[in-house]
Image (tube, grey):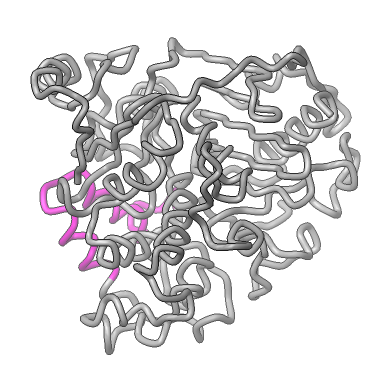
């Protein structure tokens, strides 16, 4: 997910029997999951057409991403149940453009397919639509970038990556002499590499569109690597912010090389099993067991999306209290880059950090309630096209997850993203 206008693999749990995998694979279209996610749609949309799917196709496609593409399973361990909050969210409302909208209105306006509100780590609200259930695996789109950036932090804590000040070529020496030569991991994770990348979701010839075509055919890894390796430099590194799924893919590749593990396996080992996630998930794989997609492709249940948000809320502490992120990592991740095009009148502090967004109510927003001053300040937003969201606000001890099928991949900020900021701020006030 980008902004053109700113206001505007596999490590299997030893506790699971081999026979259970065979049964699960048969039930889940060949994917080793127990239980098989529901609903199980039999007719899947063509992944070649992902950017032009109908609204109905998006619902089916997003909850069957784990079947539409090759994937690596990351298995859960001992589940930590989410308790029910005493103070439940019943309703909240906001105002924009002279109209007042309540929670039920918001769900319709945002085409919400699932929503979870965790206050103080407990479930204050949970909602499913379109037949989705507690076992549904919904695809992250670029929410996966925030998961990858978090795994980079864990790798630094473990010493597998030395520093964000390292050059990319320290991990990918074959990129010496390319546009990536001289770019640091910090510039890569903040999308200030200066390497040209066209993220236009409406242009069938954009770099992003070419990436999606690579993903829908055999040889995806070599295809995407060829695109990323031959990009040109547009700006000096560090000077200008420009959203890049190509750069995010490369960050995931660096992480896999540094850890010697696929993203799915590393996520399973470091977070998914020790943090009490309740269900298995699947990560879109370019080469099964070896290369997963750094830019997106994380598929998990609604509650486990929420558990990941709680992990960030708790500064990278597992539920047993062990901290596996570096000290101050979450603060650093939410220190928005001041590079050109990140800073604007709407967000003078910047809009992008370590693959997390600043989606607070714009400072210059008019005729909205809550106002910018009343909004969720210093919150981190993992955002994916068509309205996939994990919002983490440490000041309010609040995590909100949203699955959506917005009509546009990247609407104007004055539309769905603004209303999300308004509704989430209203929810925070309601549950304060």
User: Would you say residue 347 is visible in this rendering?
Assistant: yes
Give the residues drawn in magenta, as a range: 201-228
- Give how far across and how far down residue 106 sits, in percent: 69, 22
| Viewer-side residue, 140 vs 60 | 140
Q: Position of residue 241 (x, y in %)?
A: 57, 70
Residue 359 vertical placement versus 55 (above, below) = below
* Residue 409 in view here: no
All told, the count of numbered labels is 0
Q: Residue at x 41, y 23 (%)?
A: 59
Q: Which residue is at the front of the view, 365 or 397?
A: 397
Look at 33% across and 13% down and name the residue there: 38
Q: From the top left corner, tell me how far across and down residue 234 is, in percent.
A: 46, 80
Q: Is residue 388 magenta?
A: no
Please indicate whether residue 398 sits to the left or right of residue 138 in the image: right
171 relative to 368, above or below: below
Q: Image quadrant for the C terminus? A: top right
Compared across the picture, whether 408 is left or right of 358 comes to left
User: Magenta stretch containing residue 209, yes or no?
Assistant: yes
């Amino acid at each position: 997910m980008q902004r053109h206008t700113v206001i505007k693999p596999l490590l299997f749990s030893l506790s699971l029997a081999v026979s259970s995998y065979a049964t699960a694979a048969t039930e889940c279209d060949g994917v080793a999951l127990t239980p098989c996610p529901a609903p199980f749609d039999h007719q899947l949309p063509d992944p070649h057409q992902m950017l032009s799917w109908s609204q109905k196709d998006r619902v089916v496609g997003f909850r069957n991403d784990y079947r539409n593409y090759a994937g690596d399973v990351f298995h859960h361990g001992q589940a930590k149940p989410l308790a029910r909050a005493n103070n439940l969210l019943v309703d909240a409302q906001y105002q924009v453009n002279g109209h007042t909208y309540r929670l039920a209105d918001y769900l319709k306006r945002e085409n919400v397919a699932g929503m979870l509100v965790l206050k103080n780590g407990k479930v204050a609200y949970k909602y499913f639509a379109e037949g989705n259930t507690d076992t549904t695996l919904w695809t992250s789109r670029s929410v996966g970038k925030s998961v990858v950036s978090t795994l980079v932090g864990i790798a630094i804590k473990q010493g597998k990556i030395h520093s964000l000040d390292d050059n990319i070529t320290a991990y990918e020496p074959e990129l010496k002499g390319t546009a990536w030569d001289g770019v640091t991991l910090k510039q890569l994770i903040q999308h200030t590499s200066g390497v040209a990348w066209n993220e236009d979701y409406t242009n069938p010839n954009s770099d992003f569109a070419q990436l999606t075509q690579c993903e829908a055919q055999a040889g995806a890894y070599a295809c995407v690597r060829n695109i990323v390796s031959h990009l040109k430099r547009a700006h000096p590194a560090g000077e200008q912010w420009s959203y890049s799924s190509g750069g995010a893919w490369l960050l995931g590749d660096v992480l896999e090389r540094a850890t010697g593990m696929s993203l799915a396996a590393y996520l399973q080992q470091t977070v998914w099993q020790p943090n009490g996630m309740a269900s298995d998930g699947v990560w879109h794989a370019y080469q099964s067991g070896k290369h997963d997609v750094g830019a997106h492709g994380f598929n998990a249940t609604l509650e486990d999306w929420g558990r990941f948000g709680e992990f960030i809320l708790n500064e990278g502490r597992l539920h047993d209290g062990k901290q596996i992120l570096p000290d101050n990592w979450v603060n650093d991740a939410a220190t928005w880059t001041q590079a050109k095009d990140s800073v604007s009148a709407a967000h003078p502090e910047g809009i992008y950090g370590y693959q997390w967004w600043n989606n607070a109510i714009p400072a210059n927003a008019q005729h909205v309630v809550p106002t910018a001053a009343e909004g969720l300040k210093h919150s981190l937003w993992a955002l994916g096209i068509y309205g996939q969201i994990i919002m983490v606000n440490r000041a309010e001890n609040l995590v909100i997850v949203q699955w959506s099928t917005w009509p546009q991949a990247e609407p104007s900020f004055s539309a769905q993203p603004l209303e999300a900021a308004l509704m989430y701020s209203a929810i925070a006030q309601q549950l304060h």
